[in-house]
Amino acid sequence: MRKLIIRQATTLLALAGLALSLPGHAAGQATRGTRPVTTEADMQTAKTPYTAEYKVTHERVLADGTTIIRETTEVKALDSQGRRMTATTIASADRAPITHLMVYDPVTRTQTFWHSPGKVAHVLQLPAAGQHCQTITRDDVSVISRPKSKFTSESLGTESIQGIEASGHRYTTTVPVGADGNDAPLVSTTERWTALTAGLSGLVVREIRNDPQQGKTNRELINLTQGDPDPTTFQPPEGYEVVTKDSSGCQDEAPAETRSEPTSPK
């Protein structure tokens, strides 16, 4: 008889405030119309309230030599309450621009997603710190051992970008032969520059990702305004339907409660 082992797993909380980038794969996904996703690179340590605007260019060369270039605009905002907003605007020659927005509120422990134009905002109530969920694992599933990727990093020194002193690092990942069906090593690099200015330390001001499968993504800071953003920046537009889902952090668990309510007039 197969034995089921039930063990407690620490809940992983998603924090906003940076992906979608959309850095890396997130940037590629954003150009295909997905909503912003918080990534590890976006968990910036900046404390001073700000609004930062980025230009994101994704370039991919197909096997026949065709080059596909997509450009998006990304805006990130942080206020004195610790709320973080990421807005990614995707433009296309055959349709009107659409903006995907995500807000993380550490006080209410919520993540809110909506897009504009649109009519609905989804609010995810994050689980309380320390809350656990049950994960069932099986002992009859074989695990295929895969070659380990090699990671290296190097310092690029300091540079002034948009008048901000920044420190740069280059991270290189090498996927060995056969790890992903590849007959030659796959080498991808990420060049990331972060602010050294007090209060803005950790703010990404430039990021260049080069992946042999996904293409090249260049994310560049083009404007930075310090100070608290307008409070409406962190709220769905007036008239949107707000759908709230309570979550314990377990992926397969049905929502404990879902409710809809119109946004309050400002």
Image: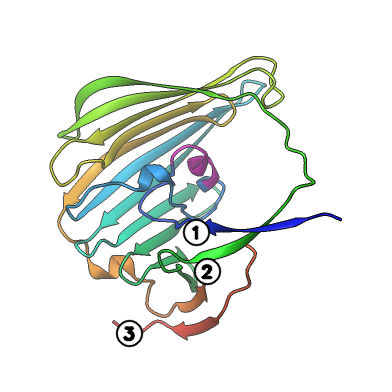
Say few, some or many: other residues with alpha carbon within 10 Å of mark 1 (under 14 / 14 to 19 / 20 or more).
some
Closer to the eye: label 1 or 3 = 1
User: Which of the two discs, 1 and 3, labels the residue nearer the N terminus?
Assistant: 1
The quarter in which the N terminus is drawn is bottom right
User: In which quarter of the view is residue 80 placed?
Assistant: bottom left
The residue located at (17%, 61%) in the rendering is 228
* Residue 250 in sight: no
Indicate left or right for 228 with 76 as reference. Answer: left
Majority secondary structure of magenta residues: helix
Asked which colour scheme the image uses, the reply is rainbow
Indicate left or right for 117 with 42 as reference. Answer: right
Q: Residue type at mark 3?
A: Pro
User: Which of the two discs, 3 and 2, labels the residue nearer the N terminus?
Assistant: 2
Instruction: Please state the horizontal and vertical placement of residue 124, each as a whole percent of the image.
Output: 47, 69
Q: Residue type at mark 1?
A: Thr
Checking the image for residue 183, the label placed there is none
Instruction: Please state the horizontal and vertical placement of residue 157, each as a whole percent of the image.
Output: 23, 21
The residue located at (46%, 68%) in the rendering is 127
Q: Secondary structure at mark 1?
A: loop
Instruction: Please provide the residue range marked out in magenta.
Output: 23-29
Q: Residue type at mark 2?
A: Ser
Q: Secondary structure at mark 3?
A: loop
Q: Which residue is mark 1?
A: 11
The answer to whether marks 1 and 2 mark residues whose Cβ atoms lie closer than 8 Å is yes
Checking the image for residue 265, the label placed there is 3
Q: Which residue is mark 2?
A: 248
Say few, some or many: other residues with alpha carbon within 10 Å of mark 2 (under 14 / 14 to 19 / 20 or more).
some
Say few, some or many: other residues with alpha carbon within 10 Å of mark 3 (under 14 / 14 to 19 / 20 or more).
few
Instruction: Please state the horizontal and vertical placement of residue 75, each as a whole percent of the image.
Output: 33, 51
